[in-house]
Image (cartoon, rainbow, N blue to C red):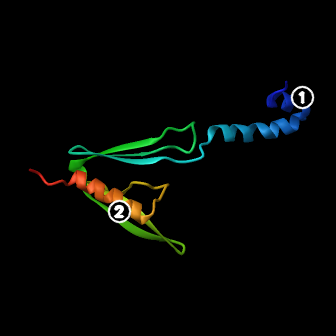
Amino acid sequence: MHTLASWITTHLPWYSRALLAPAMTWLIFTKSHTEESLLVIRSLGVQTSTSSPSYLWTSSTRFIPTSSIQDIFIYEAFKGFEVRYYLSIVVEGEEDVVVVFPSVLPRRRVLEQVWRGARGCLYEPKG
């Protein structure tokens, strides 16, 4: 019984194997999807996470304390003829807003549900 690796080494010329090796390496180390998340921890803050497009790079995670959050909102932007919606966090002392799902770009309806849940946890009435 022959494996694919043994067939490639015995039946393909060296130059074909040389071209095939980088392509196979790229396929092995790339992910088919990106994961992004928002974790809201009541009375503490929010954590945003984005996975990397490859197994070779690390994912990015950021924690923003509640005391630094000025506002969380949905805004719209135009890309070509398309309207895109973004969930953003305004952080005190920072010039730019933090975009929560920069790669996935969920639809407005999904962002509204996340926005309501996040605001409900962050700005719940005291008492």
Q: Residue at x 54, y 73 (%)?
A: 80
Q: Quadrant of the N terminus?
A: top right
Q: Nearer the viewer, residue 54 or 126?
A: 126
Label 2: element kind: helix
Which residue sits at x=49%, y=55%?
A: 104
Q: Residues within 10 Å of mark 1 (few under 14, many from 20)?
A: few
The answer, for residue 96, to whether it is visible in the render is: no
Identify whether 53 is placed above or below 113: above
Numbered mark located on residue 110 in the image:
none
Q: Position of residue 94 (x, y in %)?
A: 30, 55
| Residue 10 numbered mark, or none | 1
Residue 61, percent across and down? Answer: 40, 42
Residue 44 in sight here: yes
Of 87 and 109, nearer the camera is 109
Vertical placement of 28 versus 68: above or below?
above
Q: Amino acid type of disc 1?
A: Thr
Q: Earlier in the sequence, mark 2 or mark 1?
A: 1
User: Would residue 8 be found to the left or right of residue 23 on screen?
Assistant: right
Q: Quadrant of residue 31?
A: top right
Report the Cα–Cα distance between label 2 and label 1. Answer: 57 Å
Query: Position of 127 compared to 93: left or right?
Result: left
User: Residue 106 occupies which quadrant of the picture?
Assistant: bottom left
**Which residue is label 2 attached to?**
112
